[in-house]
Image: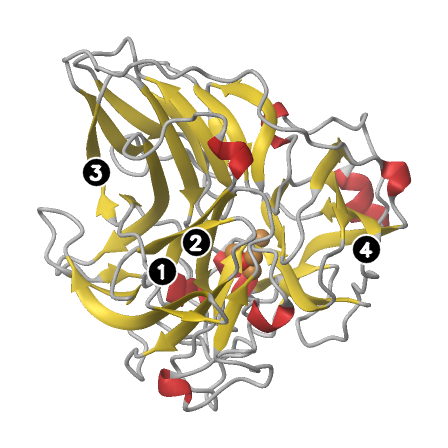
Amino acid sequence: MKQIQPTAFLNNQPYYEVTMIQTMKKLHRDLPPTKIWGYNGEYPGPTFRVWRNQPIHVLWKNELPLKHFLPIDTTVHGAEKDKPEVRTVVHLHGGVTPDTSDGYPEAWFTRGFKEVGPYFTNEIYTYPNQQKATSLWYHDHAMGITRLNIYAGLAGLYIIHDEEEMNLDLPKFPFEIPLIIQDRSFHRDGSLLYPSQPEIPVPGVDPSVIPDFFAETIVVNGKVWPYIEVDPRLYRLRILNGSNARFYRLSLSNGAPFIQIGTDQGLLASPVEVPHLLLAPAERADVLVDLRSFHGETITMMNDAESPFPQGTKPDPETAGSVMQFRVSSKPSALATCSIPNQLTHIPKLKEKQSHKTRKLLLNTRSDSYGRSIHLLNDRLWVEPISEDPRLWSVEVWSLVNVTKATHPIHLHMVRFQVLDRQPFDEEKYEEEGKIVPTGPRRPPDPNEQGWKDTVRANPKEITRIIVPFGPYSGLFVWHCHILEHEDYEMMRPYYVIS
Ligand code: C2O
Ligand code: CU
Ligand code: CU
């Protein structure tokens, strides 16, 4: 992936321009070119590399066609017939960004800013970059069509560096490799396939939104099932699950573990060895992989996560069960020394007693008037009045009670949080009496979740509690499930930080 360079300075700070365009890209040797939408015509978009405390400005421009090439469901809120078909707005996922630059779903704009959504305020976005070093990603967030815009190609990486991370002497380019993992399906002619109906078609709606989409081909950094040539040494992989709905449980065919050093929002306190790395859509893992004793070997990165997760089917090892390959060269590497630090950073552990308020928030479903299931946050639709309104600088515990059948990756804009615990509850008692009755103790988060997060897996039949300091900005943001089909179809809510 290309790295983007600023083209000018604004207030003495780097200024970038990024143009969304439609183009053709060859994603595999045996596949005809694929029509994609790319930031600067790239898929994935160009990578930003910025420094902590060095703000930047970006003008995101839309020069896309006026017609979408993927199926829009006009019964979905925000995507109705009276709205322009092709709307875009860019969100920096995990960015601690003021609301006017956060990419609110209704702050969309069309080609040349000809039409704008009701919450649009400014063309140029500013990213303060005051947060710790980590891998963020930017992607489209337009109301009701996010799943289609991202599937078409509108996503890229945004890496923040800082002194603390630099001083750790971790592998650097070309031994630091970002991996954006996505699933895509193709028609024979190379074009992207996105279903216009669920498996059992919906009478009266065409095209219709589907409950979730699992494609059968894995695309890494815009290439179908790629391999990369590597040296027998230590590598740093910044892994992003950029898929619409697919979870990945990654492992390496040679049995080598991932040594995880960072989560969504930066370094862990100390490295954690993980033989299987589970990533829900939008989650990131910063890992080290030690290839020093694998000269000449070909290592496959495999995936065995069920879809839907966790109660669905395992992927076929021939299709979505394989992700990519590392071909390790047989020559011993010259500079093979690169040690793994024992200590990475300090993470103050937030305690429940520090919180000012607890909110119990249901993750549930309902049927719409066509008999389709709608996923909801606390049984509320997007258009209902704001219900989550934390005070600036307050600390809240959000208790996510998942009464659905699937794991939902819940993401909050602007903030970072910690996972407190997960606790099972009695599903039958809930179905019969509507009561949440715990059936076991609270479990601490997994060792590789004990850092700062911006997306958390809320499992079915569990209460997942997160603790969230609301700051540094007040204003209007959103929280949502990051399964894009859920996000687009009502599993998203505005929230307001009151100053
Ligand atoms: Cu990647 Cu609103 O999210
Ligand atoms: Cu986000
Ligand atoms: Cu969901």
Quadrant of the rendered structure where residue 88 is?
Answer: bottom left
* Secondary element type, mark 1: helix
User: Disc 4 vs disc 2: which is toward the camera?
Assistant: 4
User: Disc 2 vs disc 3: which is toward the camera?
Assistant: 3
Mark 2 neighbour density, 10 Å: few (under 14) some (14–19) many (20 or more): many
User: Disc 1 vs disc 3: which is toward the camera?
Assistant: 3
Mark 4 neighbour density, 10 Å: few (under 14) some (14–19) many (20 or more): some
Quadrant of the rendered structure where residue 498 is?
Answer: bottom right
Residue appearing at x 65%, y 41% in the figure: 460
Mark 3 neighbour density, 10 Å: few (under 14) some (14–19) many (20 or more): some
Q: In the rendering, which numbered label is found on residue 226?
A: 3
Image position of 340 (left or right of 342) = left
Q: Real-space Cα distance between discs 1 and 3?
A: 19 Å
Find out if the beta carbon at label 3 lies less than 8 Å from the nearest ligand 1 atom: no
> Which residue has dot 1 on it?
151
Vertical comparison of 137 with 330: above or below: below
* Secondary element type, mark 2: loop
Q: In the rendering, which numbered label is found on residue 244?
A: 2
Looking at this view, name the residue that lies furthest to the top: 293
Mark 1 neighbour density, 10 Å: few (under 14) some (14–19) many (20 or more): many
Q: Do the residues labelled 2 and 1 touch (CB within 8 Å)?
A: yes
Image position of 311 (left or right of 400) = left
Q: Real-space Cα distance between discs 2 and 3?
A: 20 Å
> Which is nearer the N-term, disc 3 or disc 4?
3
> Which residue has dot 4 on it?
393
Would you say residue 358 is visible in this rendering? yes
